[in-house]
Structures are given as C-alpha cells and as structure tokens.
Image (cartoon, rainbow, N blue to C red):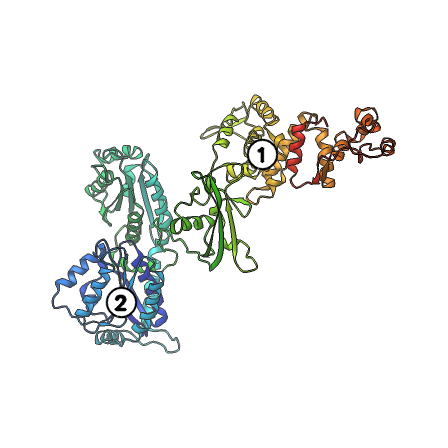
C-alpha cells in the first residue's frame, strides 16, 4: 500500500492562471506525501467534494464578481443542495482577482464562506491575489501543503484503503513496492501500449483564406505526436472527399469568407460533399474548429456547415464544435488539447474508448513537454535575472521651446530587461512625454546610440553590460547622429529615404542562364556569389548603418554607407544587366558616392555591423579608384597626403607641401614659384636669409619656411580628407 494521502485540487479559471497554479500545487504535493488529483470545477461533482478529506481551491473572479465559466455550474449545484454537509473536509482557498474592480476576488470569497458554512475546516486562511499573483500563490502552496499532509485520514479513506488490501495480493517486502504503485505502473504500461498500437493516423483538413487556419492546422500536427498520434495536414483544395471514409480521425479547421461563404480552397470540396453518392462516414471520428468574425451576420458559418454535413453523413463527433472570433488563440488552444485527447482515445480499429480519456489527460498533464501556457499553445520559459542598479541618462529635446539637455534616473531593474523595455517603463511610470520610436526587438527603425554604440535597443540586455567600480551600470542614451532630431530620441530619417529613392535601387535584369524545373524555369547562381551578396546585405537597419559613418553628420550630399553597400551588392549580382552595372559604377564614383566616405574604421568598430559590410565598402572604393587609375584629388595626391598624416600623427603646411607632390615632386621645387619666394625671403616667418639658402640646397625646401596655419594632432581622419577635398590638390 502506498503511504500517499489523497488531495483534491479544484480550479475555476477564465484565462488559465488558476489552472496553472493548481497544476503547480499538484506537482509539489508529491514531496509532502500527498497524491494530488487536479480537476477543473466542471469535471468534478458535489459527491466527490463531500467525500474528500483534503480540498484546495484556486478560483479567479470574472467580470463584476462572477464565477468563471467552468465554475458556474458547480457553484449552482452546491448551493442547490441544502442538506450538503462538508464536515470532515479540510480546505483552503486561493482567490485571484483585480483590485481595480469593486468586487475584488469575490468568487474565492464565496467558496471560502460556503465551505465554512457547511462545516468544513479551514486549515489556512484565504489568500486574495491581485494581478501580480505569482509570489502570493507560491507562498500559499508552500504553506498549505504541509498542513494538508498533517490532516488525519477520514473513515471513508481508511475503508477504501482496507478494501483494496483485501482484494490485492501481498507484496514482497524485499521489493519495497506497494500494490498501488504496481497498479499505477501497469496502467501506464497499458496506456503506452494502447498509444503505440494499431492505426494512429490523424488527418487535419484546413480551409483558409488568410492563412490563419493553415497555421493552426500545422501547430495541431506538431502537437499530435505528444498524444501518440501521427498527424498529417491536408489542404481542402484537391483533397479526395471519397477517401474520407478511410480516415478514422479527422479534425477540420475552417474559416468563413465574406457573407458565410467557404474560403476559396474549400469551395470545390464543399461542392463534392453536398453531391449525390457521397460515402457514409460511419466510423469517422471528427471535430470542427470554426474561425470567423462576429461583426458579420453569418458568424463562423463555414465551420457550422462542415460540422452539420459530417454528422449527416454518419460521422462521430467527439468534441463539440468551437466557434472562434478574431481573437482566436485562447479558444483554439483549448479546442486543440481537448480534441487531441479524444482523438488519442480512438483505438486502432476506429472505436472510441471513452474510459481512456482520464488516463490520457493525466498522462499529458504529467508531461513537462506539454505546458500550454502561451496563447498559441506552446510553453515559453521565463528568463529572470537578479536586479541591478542602473543610472539612465537620456538626451532630451523639446521642439516647442527649442531646449535641449538630459534627464537622469537611478533605477533598480532586473538584468533580463532590454534597453527598449527600460524606455517603456520610464515612459509609463515617470515621464509620459519621453519620445522614442517603439517596436519589436529587431525593428530597424528603433536604433539609437547607447554609450556611444549604435544599436537596436530591443536586442541589448542589461546583464550583458559591464559594471562600473561602484557596481552600477551607466546608460547614456542619445539619438542617432546625422539625422534631424524631432523630439528626444526620435529622429527624422526622411532624407535617407529620399536618397534611397534617387539611387534607383530597382532591379534591371540581364538575360542569363537558367534551368528547367518542375515549377518552371529558374535562374541559377554560384553558391559563393550568393553567400557574398547575402553577407554584405546582412545589416539590421539602414538608418543605423548610415549613422555609423563619420562623414554623414558633416555631408548632406553623401548618400551614406547603407546605399553604397546596397548599390555595390546590385553591381556584383550576376543577374543585373550590363547597362545597369555601368550606371551603378558612375553613381558610386560620383562626388556623392563612395569617394566621399573618409574613414571606414568608424564603421568597422561598431559591434552591430559585420566586418563583411566594411570590407564591401572598401572593395567599392578600391574599384572606383581603379577605374580612374588613381588620378585626380583621390589619386596619388591623397595617397601621399594620407600616408604622411597617418604615419606622423600631425598635420601642418610643411607636411602638406612635401607630401602632396610625392618624392619626385620635390625636385620641381627648384623651379617652382614657392622656392623663389623662399629664396627672396617672402615667407612671412621673419627667419634669416641664410636659412632660406640652406633650405634650397638641402631639401625639402619648405622645412620651417611655410606659415604654420595649423599644426595639431589628427583626431578624426575624415576631417583631414574633407579639408583636402575642399581645397583640391592645388596646394
């Protein structure tokens, strides 16, 4: 005999929260020597409650103090029985509600008062939970289960245990296993054998106009394997209706189009279903999920038609049809689980084994693989990190007063929060005027500057940032550079969009080699070429890449690296025509093209940009210079000029004079006007004439003689090249 004590856990739930808590309590009960049975209130009876020694109730409140849908019938039944006595029943209640309503947790209070009025013993005070129920519910479970384990068994339980001992053979003490455990194991083995034997095929037919029914059908098939079923999805378009009699399990997911009409892909099958000489569907077990819009008069009419027609042809409806409105996720999930449980109870010969329902339900509920906590029926784990101290400084700009500055908040935030979630929190709880572009975590339009890094705020978690010496994290949030600020962190990217339009980014295809396939002729491309084109276009946001350049804040004409990369990818695409490639070459080599980009290192150092993109920009610039044989202002002059600046770290007139002309150009100093001015002392430096002579004999002649108009360390290389561009090569 097992020492486990029975515990009945009932839940009344509208949204699923009470059910989740009840399941958690049921799993935790085993560690306290309790054998929990978790049931919805519409699955139990008054008799079961009155004969139970230990009862836990989790109940939410719906609307204005009303019982949830699955608890309403039981509530009416227990109140109708005036002679019901719950003496000997030990209980506790967890009530869920919303304190913004007047009748807060009213349903739970009603159950608590009812049990007390009928003689039950309250072993732990009722707990009323607000919308943040997780922590109070956890404490309630941890407090009530030890008390339930200490409750002595009632006479009913003792008699039941003794009678089971009389009918069961003794257990070998050396095995240390009870007859009850052996029975449970045999039941599990029997169920496993049932789920693995015979025909376990499940056919899911969908009729869809917008794709919702098709998506649901695919999810149902994915879930079916957990119920021992082999699911297959069938489009109603082209499905042979006469073959339905060979299918033992059929689920139909169908939407309604227009005024009660079938969707396009279901119309032909529906006509066949209503024709003469249709097969008898006796032995076909079915259920229907109908999708529609309640704003139309013929709500979910297509699903109703299929449900009626299957019944007329002799089909066996296992689960009542469910009609879903536009917010269909929750109802569809409940229907899916219930339908799969019933379909799983159909044996290999097509007969429905109703006695297997509870076994399959318990089998599924006890599996961690099926935790349908999300609206779409899939379990999403909760990733929670410890709290961190964060100092958030945000750039602020008010266009009305034309004032700018920054606001700073000191916060304690969980490490799993993203920067986007921080902005939302500050906006909702501190300053509703805070303006930024909101969106999903990878929305390309949400990019901002975070501690000098240009990044999408939804992709950056707090716990990935380094801590300061004092253990805090400092966040400096600013708008993207090179764009006009509308307000706070919101910028206007319309200029970039206009440049993109003027770049003529559309495809002009060339005649190229292709292959004939079953789906028609298609073009072919070398694998390495396709990978290269994909890698250089693999950036998350055009505006973010545009802002990575040091040039874009100073040049309104420059098209920016995002458009350069896009044009370069089009230029290297073998599908592009020769004329289009020539146009792109001219476009990239123009004054607003890649030659205006001054320093690619500013792009490479951004962690959000892959190296392949900066390499592509370098390839584009090299190609553009090669076409001009390195002539002109971006030719040999810039070559020597930038080399000297990079090597010396200084920029002054002397360096410019010596290096712009190159090493061979120094000889021309003897015959230039510059040397004559030096020789005659027209240098405005006040130096001795003898120095001028030495300067002529011992070149470079310009050392110490050119006026020092500027002489400083080079901080930003793009500024040096920008100066050269403006002055041309005629120093």
Q: Quadrant location of residue 303?
A: top left
Label disc, if present, on residue 538 of the rendered structure: none
- Location of residue 281 with respect to 189 vertically, above or below: above
Residue 407: x and y in percent read 47, 49
Q: Residues within 10 Å of mark 2 (few under 14, many from 20)?
A: some
Kindly state the secondary structure of the residue where label 2 is placed. loop
Q: Quadrant location of residue 164?
A: bottom left
Q: CA distance from mark 1 to mark 2?
A: 67 Å
Kindly state the secondary structure of the residue where label 1 is placed. loop
Label disc, if present, on residue 126 of the rendered structure: 2
- Location of residue 440 with respect to 269 vertically, above or below: below
- Location of residue 87 with respect to 311 vertically, above or below: below
Residue 2: x and y in percent read 32, 73
Q: Nearer the viewer, residue 385 or 342?
A: 385
Quadrant (top left, top right, bottom left, bottom right) of the C terminus: top right
Label disc, if present, on residue 554 of the rendered structure: 1
Regarding residue 461, the answer to whether it shows in the image is: no
> Seen in the image, is 426 located left or right of residue 73?
right
Quadrant (top left, top right, bottom left, bottom right) of the N terminus: bottom left
Q: Nearer the viewer, mark 1 or mark 2?
A: 1
Q: Please tell me how many numbered marks the rendered image carries.
A: 2
Regarding residue 273, the answer to whether it shows in the image is: yes
> Seen in the image, is 283 located left or right of residue 680?
left
Residue 328: x and y in percent read 30, 45
Q: Residues within 10 Å of mark 1 (few under 14, many from 20)?
A: few
Residue 37: x and y in percent read 29, 65
Name the residue furthest bottom. Answer: 173
């Amino acid at each position: 005999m097992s020492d486990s004590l029975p515990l009945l856990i009932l839940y009344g739930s509208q949204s699923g929260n009470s059910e989740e808590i009840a399941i958690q309590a049921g799993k935790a009960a085993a560690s306290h020597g309790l054998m929990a049975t978790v049931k919805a209130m519409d699955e139990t009876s008054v008799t079961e409650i009155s004969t139970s020694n230990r009862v836990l109730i989790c109940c939410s409140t719906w609307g204005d103090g009303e019982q949830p849908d699955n608890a309403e019938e039981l509530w009416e039944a227990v109140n109708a029985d005036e002679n019901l006595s719950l003496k000997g029943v030990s209980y506790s209640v967890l009530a869920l509600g919303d304190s913004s309503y007047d009748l807060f947790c009213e349903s739970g209070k009603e159950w608590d008062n009812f049990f007390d009025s009928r003689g039950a013993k309250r072993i732990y005070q009722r707990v009323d939970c607000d919308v943040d129920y997780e922590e109070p519910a956890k404490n309630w479970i941890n407090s009530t289960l030890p008390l339930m384990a200490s409750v002595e068994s009632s006479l009913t339980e003792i008699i039941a245990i003794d009678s089971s001992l009389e009918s069961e053979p003794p257990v070998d003490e050396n095995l240390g296993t009870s007859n009850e455990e052996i029975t449970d194991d045999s039941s599990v083995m029997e169920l496993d054998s049932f789920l693995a034997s015979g025909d376990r095929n499940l056919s899911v037919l969908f009729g869809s106009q917008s794709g919702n029914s098709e998506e649901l059908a695919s999810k149902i098939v994915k879930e079916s394997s957990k119920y021992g079923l082999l699911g297959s999805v069938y489009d109603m378009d082209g499905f042979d209706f006469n073959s339905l009699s060979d299918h033992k399990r059929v689920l139909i997911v169908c939407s309604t189009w227009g005024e009660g009409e079938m969707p396009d892909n279901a119309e032909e099958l529906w006509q066949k279903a209503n024709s003469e000489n249709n097969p008898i569907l006796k032995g076909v077990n079915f259920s229907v999920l109908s999708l529609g819009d309640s704003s139309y008069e013929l709500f979910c009419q297509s699903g109703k038609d299929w449900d009626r027609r299957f019944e007329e042809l002799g089909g066996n409806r296992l689960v009542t049809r469910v009609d879903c409105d536009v917010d269909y996720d929750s109802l569809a999930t409940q229907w899916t689980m219930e339908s799969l449980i019933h379909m799983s109870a159909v044996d290999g010969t097509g007969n429905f084994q109703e006695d297997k329902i509870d076994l399959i339900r318990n089998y599924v509920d006890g599996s961690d693989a099926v935790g349908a906590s999300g609206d779409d029926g899939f379990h999403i784990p909760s990733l929670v990190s410890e709290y961190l101290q964060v100092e958030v400084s945000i750039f602020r700009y008010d266009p009305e007063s034309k004032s700018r500055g920054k606001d700073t908040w000191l916060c304690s935030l969980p490490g799993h929060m993203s920067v986007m979630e921080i902005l939302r929190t500050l906006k909702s709880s501190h300053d509703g005027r805070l303006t930024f572009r909101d969106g999903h975590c990878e929305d390309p339009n949400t990019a901002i500057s975070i501690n000098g890094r240009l990044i999408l705020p939804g992709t950056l978690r707090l716990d990935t940032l380094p801590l300061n010496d004092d253990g805090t994290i400092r966040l400096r949030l600013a708008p993207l550079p090179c764009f006009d600020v509308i307000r706070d962190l919101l910028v206007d990217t319309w200029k970039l969009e206009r440049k993109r339009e003027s770049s003529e980014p559309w495809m002009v295809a060339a005649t190229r080699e292709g292959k004939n396939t079953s789906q028609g002729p298609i073009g072919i491309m070398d694998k390495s070429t396709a990978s290269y084109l994909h890698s250089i276009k693999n950036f998350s946001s055009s505006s973010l890449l545009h802002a990575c350049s040091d040039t874009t804040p100073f040049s309104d004409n420059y098209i920016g690296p995002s458009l350069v990369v896009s044009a370069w990818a089009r230029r290297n695409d073998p599908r592009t025509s020769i004329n289009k490639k020539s146009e792109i070459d001219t476009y990239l080599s123009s004054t607003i093209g890649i030659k205006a980009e001054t320093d690619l290192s500013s792009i490479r150092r951004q962690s959000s940009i892959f190296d392949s993109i900066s390499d592509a920009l370098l390839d584009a610039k090299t190609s553009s210079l090669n076409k001009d044989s390195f002539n002109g202002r971006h030719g040999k002059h810039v070559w020597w000029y930038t080399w000297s600046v990079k090597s010396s770290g200084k920029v002054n007139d002397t360096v410019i004079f010596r290096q712009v002309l190159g090493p061979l150009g120094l000889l021309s100093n003897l015959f230039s006007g510059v040397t004559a001015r030096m020789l005659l002392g027209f240098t405005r430096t006040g130096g001795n004439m003898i120095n001028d002579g030495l300067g002529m004999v011992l070149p470079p002649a310009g050392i110490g003689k050119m006026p020092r108009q500027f002489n400083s360390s080079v901080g930003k290389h793009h500024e040096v090249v920008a100066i050269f561009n403006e002055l041309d090569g005629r120093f």
